[in-house]
Image (spheres, rainbow, N blue to C red):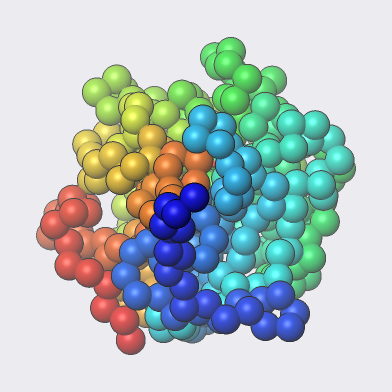
Amino acid sequence: DGTIKPVTPTNAVTNKDGSIDLITDGNPLFRHVHTADAAAYVEGDTLWLFAGHDEDDAPNNEYKMKDWLTFSTTDLKHWHQHPVGLDISAFKWADCKQAFAGHVAKRNGKYYWYVSTNWCGIGVAVSDNITGPYKDAIGKPLLTNKDCRGSKHSWACIDPAIFIDDDNTPYIIWGNRQCYIARLKDNMTEIDGEIHQIDLGNDFPFTEAPWVHKRDGKYYLTYAVSWPERMGYAMSDNIMGPWRPMGLIDGVSGNSNTTHPSIVKFKDQWLYFTHDGTLHDGHSYKRSVVMKKLEYNADGTIKPIDSTPSIVRK
Ligand code: FUB
């Protein structure tokens, strides 16, 4: 009809095995595919990024997510997108069939991919290889709405984040509207002991997307606040709390009603990942992962993200 087709900027080359080599140039990181809910993991000189995948034909009012994507880089510029290692069909019990946010952790030589599936609960898949293929580790959800005391809405049991402390104890943190934490057993597939609720107060109310990291002996819990979501964080001297809400570090993510943090140290710099809806065809259900540098004040508090300089690529 004479209208102009949107230009899809891409510097991505697809290989025979379906993997993709790409060079990133600013944010959003990936422009050939819609990505969300990134969970970063550093192993040796490689940064791995496990991301949710908003389908290109997602409507503008509902998630359409079927699988999770794996990216890796050693210099934050050249990235490799690996063949898909996990999709929602791996979880036979997940009737809701939605590949919501996940997090990969390594223990005892195996990789565990914790995923949320919307109202069907949190599952865990396992693989000997970081790129998969991953298979359901227990054949049932690890956590369901029944484990989310005080929550009544169907999507309460989402957004798992794993934190392994310096003494090697693994924790799982998750939730929507209420934030929960529990220890995991050494096998990574069972909850060890009680589930606790994390009190984050009412000034910066917890919506979802918890992420825990540790720096200089202090624990940081970053999470999506309010709606549309902004990025807030809390600090603690103890993983089990009490947590002190510290306020916001990032605003509403451009053109997206959600935001979702991941924070890791990679080659001497702290990196912060979230997503926005700023691709030419983006919106809240066609999101894109962004990467920024994270900086701290002398007292250990986090500097607001917008005021930080851009990434130093090595
Ligand atoms: O991607 C689906 C859901 O949107 C995630 O589970 C939430 O954290 C929000 O980003």
Residue 236: quarter of image: top left
Residue 97: quarter of image: top right
Q: Residue at x 50, y 40 (%)?
A: 285
Observer-nearest residue: 309 or 195? 309
Observer-nearest residue: 57 or 277? 57
Q: Residue at x 74, y 53 (%)?
A: 87
Observer-nearest residue: 63 or 188? 63
Does the rendering let one see residue 275?
no
Number of dots carrying numbers? 0
Which residue extends farthest front?
1
Which residue extends farthest bottom?
314
Does the rendering let one see residue 51?
yes
Q: Is residue 205 above or below residue 307?
A: above
Residue 168: quarter of image: bottom right
Tell me where residue 229 appears, x and y as whole percent.
Answer: 35, 34
Tell me where residue 178 appears, x and y as whole percent.
Answer: 48, 24
Left or right of residue 284, residue 16 in this image: right
Q: Residue at x 43, y 69 (%)?
A: 9
Tell me where residue 219 appears, x and y as whole percent.
Answer: 36, 49
Left or right of residue 170, residue 285 in this image: left
Q: Is residue 240 above or below residue 307?
A: above
Observer-nearest residue: 152 or 282? 282
Left or right of residue 145, residue 79 in this image: left
Left or right of residue 2, residue 49 in this image: right
Tell me where residue 4 appears, x and y as whole percent.
Answer: 41, 57
Q: Is residue 61 above or below residue 169?
A: above
